[in-house]
Structure formats: structure tokens, C-alpha cells
Image (cartoon, rainbow, N blue to C red):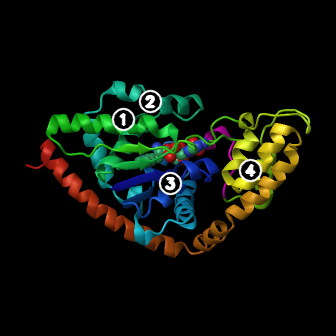
Amino acid sequence: MRILSGIQPSGKLHIGNYFGMMKPMIENMDKGELYAFVVNFHAMTSVSDAKDLQQGTLEAAADFLALGLDPDRCIFWVQSDVPEVTELMWILSSLTPMGLLERCHSYKDKTAKGIAASHGLFSYPVLMAADILLFQAEVVPVGKDQKQHLEVARDIAIKFNNSFGETFVLPEPQISKDLATVPGVDGQKMSKSYGNTIGIFLEEKQLKKSVMAIVTDAAAVEAVKDPDACNLYNIFKLFAPAERTAEIRDLYENGGAAYGYIKLELVDILWEYFRKARERRAELMANPGYLHEVLAAGALKAREKAAVTLDLVRERVGLKY
Ligand code: ADP
Ligand code: TRP
């Protein structure tokens, strides 16, 4: 089985990214052939500062490795190091109906939030389809917000196969049922663009600030509360051991849940949860030479795979003459 997913280097990694995509990818490492990459071409739709993009790319790569991705057990690269993807994107663009892209929520959401309505942003799903189809990925672990992009990739693959003969495998999204959408501190979906994230690799002080900002109701400590409707509880249960979650649940249901104390406990739990990864990440960021080496080796392997698909595609569409 070929499993593939990518992450944009467009901001600090948060716990929504972790549960939606990084953790499932890392857990998938031995379940098949794993393809993991940093999608810096995609990030150009929202990052316009060259230094930010460059630094973000190295950080995203370090995030992946620090959290446990083993580059010897997968193919790990930066999107722009495999330029074959842009050629495939053009070929796919030529058969992608405008209506398919016009229906995409992500484009509408992003422009509504102030991201410039560029052609790149509009055609973002075609590049994502090219990412997936170039490697004949069968399974794509993502958060729920990416489901529609997977449908677009499938639609494009079907259209191509119907027009030019069976070429692409149809990819399936892998969306974890319980963790499809991790809530942000305000209860909406956690997202960099909503400013409601809890970062994984924050300084302790900043981590505390983010956790303290989790919005709760004004109910008294002794009041009976519904844990499932509480944002704090929903984040707490993702990290706390099962017995501790059960105790806290009991306090909500029988009175005695003090939000301030639960938040402080959550800060400690998060700090410990990511301790090893944080240390490993600091080591990696101090050694960019190693990161470059790993990524260059990954790009070579990825290009070999990409060439096989692209060769076939070129032949199918008549680019070989
Ligand atoms: P953001 O919304 O913060 O910009 P990205 O679009 O970069 O995040 O998402 C990277 C990956 O993390 C995607 O697979 C996405 O589905 C997943 N993801 C992002 N936010 C969440 C969330 N709140 N819950 C679950 N998965 C998420
Ligand atoms: N669009 C994805 C996101 O914002 C990132 C992405 C680009 C991706 N190409 C991909 C994810 C291919 C999975 C497979 O999170």
C-alpha cells in the first residue's frame, strides 16, 4: 500500500496538524510504502516572504523528523525538489473543469479570510492532485478539511483514465473518526488562519498563554457541566492518560471541575507529552546540514518514482513524439 501526505510550511505546527496528519503518518510508517513531504509550492499561495518560506520549510521538515518520522523507512522530501509535479499539474489542469475548482470550499474560505485570490490559490487542488497521482498514492491521511481536495484528485484521476486509458490509482482519504477536527481554543476548528491554535513546539510561557486562552463558560466550580460540550475537556482528553480523563469527566458530571486548575494541568501534560520531540527538534534545527542531506536523499528517491508515472503520462497524452 502506498500512503502519502504533505504539510505546508506556512506556520507553526499545532495540535490539530499533529492529530489530523502527522501522527497518522508516523503510525503508518510500517503499514506500507510511506511518502511524506513538505509542500512549499502550495505554501507560496499564502507566504510571500522568501525568508519565511525558507525557514518554514526547514522547520516543517524538522517537525516531521522530531515527532518520529524515520527517513530510512519512508521517502521524505520537499515538494519543489521534485519539479516533475509541476509538469503533471499542467497536464492535469488541461482536463480539470473550472466548475470542479469553483466548488472548492477551501478557496472560498481562504479568500474570505483575506488571502489574495491568486490563480495559484484557485488551482491549489490541481497541484495537490498532481502530488498524489504522481506517486500513485492509495491512501492519504489528512484532517477532514482536506476531504474535498481528495475528491477533486479522484475526479481528475477518473477523467484522465477515461480519456487516456487506465493510468492512475484512485486515492482514498484516511480521516480519523474521533480526531477529524481538533477544536481550537475558541471551539472552532483549530487553524493557523483562525489564530486559535495551541502550538506543539512553543516556549513554555507561550504554551501556558495559549492554554489559558481556551474559552470556557462561566459556570461555577461546583456546577454540573457537560464535558463533551466543553472545549477544554475535549482538548484535555486528547493528551491525558485515560484514568485521569475519567476522573476529570467525573468532576464535570458531579461538580468540582475548576477550569483554571484543569488548564494548568493541561500545560504540564502538553509540556511532557512533547518533551522528547522538542529536544530532538532543537538538535535538528541546530544541524541544518543534516536536514539538507536527508531531504536531498529523499528527493532523489522521489524523483525516481515520479519519473515512472510521468513517463507513462507523457506517452498517454501524446507528448512523446
Ligand atoms: P491550518 O488549517 O492550520 O492551516 P493545514 O491546512 O496546514 O492547517 O493542515 C495540515 C494538515 O493538518 C491537514 O491534513 C489538515 O487536514 C490537518 N489539520 C489542520 N487543522 C486540523 C484540525 N483542527 N483538526 C484535525 N486536522 C487538522
Ligand atoms: N492541502 C494540504 C493542506 O493544506 C497539503 C497538501 C498538499 C497535501 N499536497 C498534498 C496533503 C497531498 C496530502 C496530499 O494541509
Mark 1 or mark 3: which comes first in sequence? 3
Image marks 1 and 2: residues in contact by CB distance under 8 Å? yes
Tell me what residue is drawn at x 45 percent, y 52 percent. Answer: 6
Q: Amino acid at mark 3?
A: Pro
Mark 2 surroundings: few (<14), some (14-19) or many (≥20) residues within 10 A: some
The residue to which callout 4 is attached is 245
The residue to which callout 3 is attached is 24
Q: Is residue 128 above or below residue 64?
A: above
Between residue 110 and residue 36, name the one nearer to us. 36
Left or right? Give the position of 155 relative to 317: right
The magenta span reads 192-200
Q: Amino acid at mark 4?
A: Thr
Give the alpha-carbon distance from disc 2 to disc 3, as whole Å: 25 Å
Mark 2: secondary structure: loop
Task: Report which quarter residue 168 is drawn in.
Answer: top left
Mark 3 surroundings: few (<14), some (14-19) or many (≥20) residues within 10 A: some
In the rendering, at what x and y percent does residue 74 appear? 40, 65
Give the alpha-carbon distance from disc 1 to disc 2, as whole Å: 9 Å
Can residue 47 be seen here? The reply is no
In the rendering, at what x and y percent does residue 213 appear? 79, 43
Left or right? Give the position of 80 relative to 89: right
